[in-house]
Image (tube, helix red, strand yellow):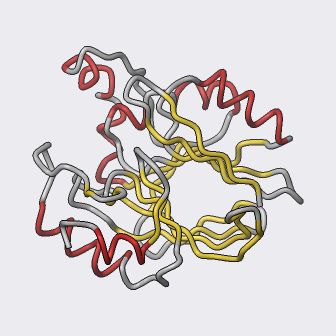
Amino acid sequence: MILKMMETGPLMVNTYIVGDEDTGEAAVFDPGGDVDAIMGALKDEGLKVKYIINTHAHFDHVGGNKELQDRTGAPIIISEEEAADLEDAGEKAGIFGCTAEASSASKFIKEGDIIEVGSIRFRVVDLRGHSSAGQGFIFEGDFDINGKKETRKAIICGDALFSGSIGRTDFPGGNLDLLLENIRRKIFILPDDTLVMSGHGPVTTVGREKKYNPFF
């Protein structure tokens, strides 16, 4: 498995490229912008984009959707409830003094769905609370941990859970109680060594957040 994490776009979103080294297929999660850099990383690893996947539709996570789709032909995947927000990305970005290009969803996903990229299987979980219908993606692979390869679970969770914090819930569609419940029921049930790949900031683990995150 190939995993690349890049900070992209005006708000430095964590964009994740997860690829199967045998088939060359890859998924790009939350391309916030800087598509030239994303394309360069894909080329360096010999990967072709099968899916562009958004954890949620906030402008900073979707600003590179259209350009990446135009350059790769890959479909854009998101929850149906947030699909319309992709088309308002430019307007929402302008409120924050930023720019983002509107895009359109190609396919909708819901909790329990499985997305296959080569031999990698991503299981979709509902993590709404930061946004109206945010989603997480649980998968397993061989990760480089302190210079050693270890097989672990991981979750790409957008802005639901951060290292030492959680996503803000004062935007339209936010719900603090629901976000906390979903983190406890969907993320904290995973093994303690599960990698938590957030939408901003460093990678953490389930065990670390259960023990040290002040919201829990």
User: Residue 62: x percent and y percent?
Assistant: 43, 35
Quarter of the image with the N terminus is bottom right
Residue nearer the viewer, 72 or 38: 38
Frontmost residue, 197 versus 78: 197
For the C terminus, the image quarter is bottom left
Residue 208 location, x and y as percent? 40, 72
**Residue at 55% across / 69% down in the picture?**
154
Above or below, 87 against 57 in this view is above
**Residue located 41% across and 37% down the image:** 61
Query: In the image, residue 76 lies at what x, y percent?
Result: 53, 43
Q: Nearer the viewer, residue 77 or 156?
A: 156
Q: Nearer the viewer, residue 154 or 149?
A: 149
Q: Position of residue 118 (x, y in %)?
A: 78, 62
Horizontally, residue 55 falls left or right of residue 117, namely left
* Quarter location, residue 46: top right
Residue sitting at x 34%, y 42%: 57
